[in-house]
Image (cartoon, rainbow, N blue to C red):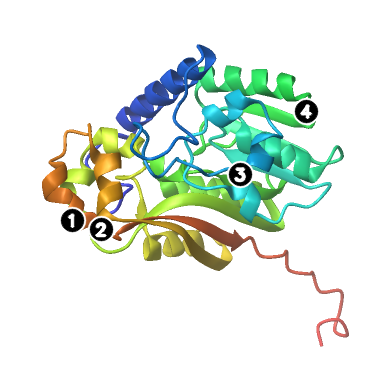
Amino acid sequence: MSAGNVGIEANDIREVVKQKYGQAALRVTSGGSSCCGATVGNGCDPITANLYDASQAGEIPEEALLASLGCGNPTALANLNSDETVLDLGSGGGIDVLLSAKRVGPTGKAYGLDMTDEMLALANQNKRRAGIENAEFLKGEIENIPLPDNSVDVIISNCVINLSADKDRVLREAFRVLKPGGRFAVSDVVTRGAMLPEIRQSVMAWVGCIAGALGENDYRDKLAASGFEKIEIEPTRIYRSEDAREFLTGQGIDVDAIAPQVDGKFLSAFIRAVKPEAKKSCCGPTCCG
């Protein structure tokens, strides 16, 4: 069964996601944590823990780190160059946007796109605290990116595309806004093998980065159908049965029954793809020879 058609209304998923991420932003604003960087076993799941090293953490406000609910570190894996324009889909508290803004330098630009008012407020607060001027946070949905065609060099994202009920549209939009030759370089959760229907059908599991995850081959197929080429999926973390207990606890799922069956079937991955270069127009018979 496709993760984009699981019998759950897209609007329901969107509202649950907004609620959870809004609450996470408010916890950080009030001095708490959304769990990034904590160790497994202290109430945080293994997907979001320990993703940024000390040097990166030192570059941005602590609140940006605390608000991260990602599954990887796309800024460490993506090849960002000075002067480039970067877009982060689902930018949350802004950690990957702020790190990207530093990477592309003052003549580059980093955009963050998020639909949650609380996260956008936190991201702009973190931007001011960091003193970064080449970052901009936009309100919107990743299925409808508010940027022009062919305007972005690199798209990054950190465990957000899996939350969308319309991944085909997300990938088409990503392709649209990328410049020819532009790169898609995201961290996301993917699956290997069949997933139990109990997990797919849980709205809360969508928010926990599990039920919305595509299979590796499905992700490749959807990227190719959107026009991308040079598609690569590189596993960064493979979750075992003991990890499943962490991220399934509290989801209304029989953890003891399911944990052994999900062993090794969920993984965080770095997903790369490229928008093809524009074809050169023919100037006459000699240049087409």
Q: Percent position (x, y) of residue 22?
A: 45, 20
Toward the top, the furthest residue is 30
Q: Can residue 178 be seen in this view?
A: yes
Q: What residue type is labelled 1?
A: Pro
Name the residue located 38 percent from the left edge and 29 percent from the top edge.
17
Left or right side of 45 for 283:
right
Q: Percent position (x, y) of residue 219?
A: 42, 59
Question: Closer to the N terminus: mark 3 or mark 2?
Answer: 3
Question: What's the mark number on residue 132?
Answer: 4
Q: Mark 1 or mark 4, which is nearer to you?
A: 1
Q: In this view, does 244 lie above or below 133?
A: below
How many numbered markers are drawn? 4
Left or right side of 51 for 166:
left
Q: Which amino acid does label 4 sit on?
A: Ile
Left or right side of 121 for 255:
left
- Tell me the quadrant of the picture where the C terminus can be found: bottom right
Q: Mark 1 or mark 3, which is nearer to you?
A: 3
Q: What residue type is labelled 2?
A: Asp
Q: Name the residue under label 3.
A: 53
Q: In this view, does 248 lie above or below 118?
A: below
Q: What residue type is labelled 3?
A: Asp
Question: Closer to the N terminus: mark 4 or mark 2?
Answer: 4
Q: How far apart are marks 1 and 2 (CA)?
A: 6 Å
Q: Distance between the residues labelled 1 and 3?
A: 31 Å
